[in-house]
Image (cartoon, helix red, strand yellow):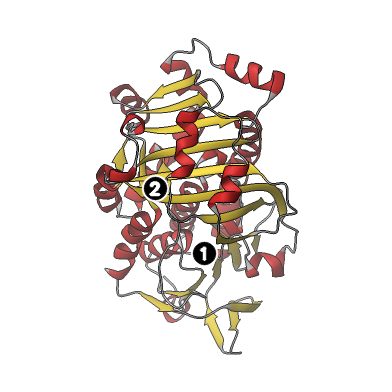
Amino acid sequence: MATQAKQLPVLVAGGGIGGLAAALALVRQGFEVKVFEQAPQIGEIGAGMQLGPNAFWAFDALGVGEAARSRAVYIDEMVMTDAIDEYTIGRVPTGEAFRQRFGNPYAVIHRADAHGSLLEGVQASDRVSFHTATRVERIEQDAHGVTVFDQHGQAHRGLALIGADGVKSVVRQQFVGDPARVTGHVVYRAVVDKADFPEDLRWNAASLWAGPNCHLVHYPLRGGEQYNVVVTFHSREQEEWGVRDGSKEEVESYFQGICPKARRLIELPKSWKRWATADRDPIERWSFGRVTLLGDAAHPTTQYMAQGACMAIEDAVTLGEALRVHGGDFDKALDLYQRSRIARTARILLSSREMGRIYHAKGVERLVRNDLWRGRSPERFYDAVEWLYGWRVENCLATH
C-alpha cells in the first residue's frame, strides 16, 4: 500500500450500524479509520430489527458473525395475518429448508445487540479512533484526499470520507442536496417483557397483522425474554421527519376497526418511541471524488422490507471488496462500490414503498391482498425472495 495510505486515515461520518460496519471493512483492508459521531457516546437507540440470511453473510465477512449469531433469536416462520378477521394471508417457514436454500437462518435481534457486535469487532482493532460529540459540518477535497470540518471548526484530514451519517446526512446534503420525502406514516416502537406479553401471542415468528392504513408487528427478542412491538399508521397530522416520545392515546385512536387479539398489542407498552418516517427517491450517483455515501445516507428507506440495517452492512462489505480488488485505490473503488449497490438498494427502497401499500390495503385492495399468496408453497415464496436473500460476498461486485 502506498505511503500516503499508511499516513492518513479514512474518515467515517456516523457511529451507527453502517458506520461501524464500514470501519470494520476498512480495517480489514489495512486502513486506519477515524469515526465521527455527533452523539456524546457510541450507542444505538431503537428496539428490534430483522436479519435475513444476507445480513449473516455480511456479518461473517466483517468477522463478527459469531457475536451476532449468539445474540439473535432464530424464528420458525414469517406470518402475515389480516388484522380485521384473523385470516392467515401468508406463512413463510424459515426452518431447515429455508437455511438449506439460503445458507443462513432468518433471525431477529435487538438493534443494540447488532450494534454491539460490530462495536466489539471495532474495539478489538487498534486502528479505529472515535471522535464523539463531533458533527461533520463541511467537506473539502483535492486529488489526494479530503478535509472534514467539524462544528468547532477543527479540520480533520483523511484519504477519503464515508458518509454513514444516517437519514439526515450532512454529507449527502452537501453533495446531493435532495429533499426528504415524508411519508405520513408514523411508527411506534416498544419492547415488552415476556411476563407482560400475552401467552397466546408468544409465537416464535416475525408476525405482522395487516390492517386498513395500519399494521402491527411482534417478535421475540433476547432469548424470548422480551418482545418487540411495532405499530404503524397513516397519520392525520402534517408530519415532520423525526423521533419523539409517543402517547398511548394517539396509538389507540388509529386502531379502531381491528380484531381484539391484535388490538391487545397496543395496550402492552408502558412507553413508546414515535418515529415519523421518510425516505428519499433513489439517486444514480453517491460517490463524489473521495467521498461516498453508505447506509441510510445513501438510500434511506421505509421499514416495510425490514432491510435498512442489512443493506448498510452489505454496503460496508461491498466497499471493502471494491477496495480489495482495486488495491486500495479509492478513486476506482468508490466508483465500483456505487455501481455494485445502486440498483439493489433502489429495488429495496421502491419495493418497500409497494409493501407498505400491500400491508395497509383496505376495501377491495384488501381482498386482492388476501388472495395474493393463497396456496403458495414455501418453495415459491423462497423463489420470490431469492434476489434479496441470495446475496453473497463473492457475487457482491458489479461485473460491468
Q: Nearer the viewer, residue 232 or 331?
A: 232
Instruction: Look at mark 1 in the image and give the residue it sits on.
Output: 329
Instruction: Look at mark 2 in the image and give the residue it sits on.
Output: 58
Looking at the image, the residue that sits furthest to the top is 375
| CB under 8 Å between discs 1 and 2 | no
Callout 1 crowding tier (Cα within 10 Å): few <14, some 14–19, many ≥20:
some
Residue 81 visible: yes
Question: Helix, strand or loop at disc 2?
Answer: helix
At x 71%, y 52%, the residue is 182
Relative to 142, is 121 above or below? Answer: above
**Viewed as shown, does residue 385 lie left or right of 283?**
left
Chain-order first, disc 1 or disc 2: 2
- The spot of residue 318 in percent (x, y) is 48, 51
Which is closer to the viewer, label 1 or label 2? 2
- The spot of residue 55 in percent (x, y) is 40, 44
**Viewed as shown, does residue 397 lie left or right of 120?**
right
Callout 2 crowding tier (Cα within 10 Å): few <14, some 14–19, many ≥20:
many
At x 53%, y 43%, the residue is 231
Residue type, numbered disc 1: Asp
Quadrant of res 64 = bottom left
Tell me how far mark 1 sits from mark 2, CA to CA.
22 Å
Residue type, numbered disc 2: Ala
